[in-house]
Amino acid sequence: MIMEGLIKEAEEFLGENPAPDVMDAGLIANAQRVEHYEIAAYGAVRTFARMMGHNDMVSLLQQTLDEEGQTDQKLTKLAESGVNQEAERAKNKK
């Protein structure tokens, strides 16, 4: 249900037909919201697996959690590499 809400938010954003630079920044922000949701979910499941003694699952879930964290960091770098600044300039031109 939460993921559906995140997708709906992204669709509403795209429906506003933002300028290309604003769209890029918005898509990155929406992708990060999805990543943060996934990080929270995998972190919780990993903790439950650890509590239940399923160490083989803990390792796999930690690997997935690490990958999600790396994706989030890449999105942050992308946003900070100039995408957000370009979006701000495009927004101010209106």
Image (cartoon, helix red, strand yellow):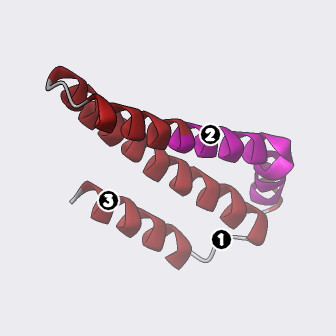
* Residue range of the region highlighted in magenta in the rendering: 67-91
* 7 or 36: nearer the viewer: 36
| Amino acid of disc 3 | Met
Image: 32 above or below 65: below
| Amino acid of disc 2 | Gln
The residue that disc 1 covers is: 18
The location of residue 52, given as percent across then percent down, is 14, 26
Query: Going 36% across and 68% down the picture, which residue do you hit?
Result: 8
Image: 14 above or below 86: below
The residue that disc 2 covers is: 70
The location of residue 32, given as percent across then percent down, is 54, 48
Foreground mark, 3 or 1, reads 3
Q: Quadrant for the N terminus, please.
A: bottom left
- Which mark is drawn over residue 3? 3
Measured Cα–Cα span from mark 2 to mark 3: 20 Å
Foreground mark, 2 or 3, reads 2
Image: 19 above or below 27: below
Sooner in the amino-acid sequence: mark 2 or mark 3: 3
Foreground mark, 2 or 1, reads 2
CA neighbours of label 1 inside 10 A, class few (<14), some (14 to 19), many (20+): some
* Label 3: element kind: helix
Measured Cα–Cα span from mark 2 to mark 1: 28 Å
The location of residue 72, given as percent across then percent down, is 59, 42
Q: Residue furthest front?
A: 56
Marks 3/1 in contact by CB < 8 Å: the verdict is: no
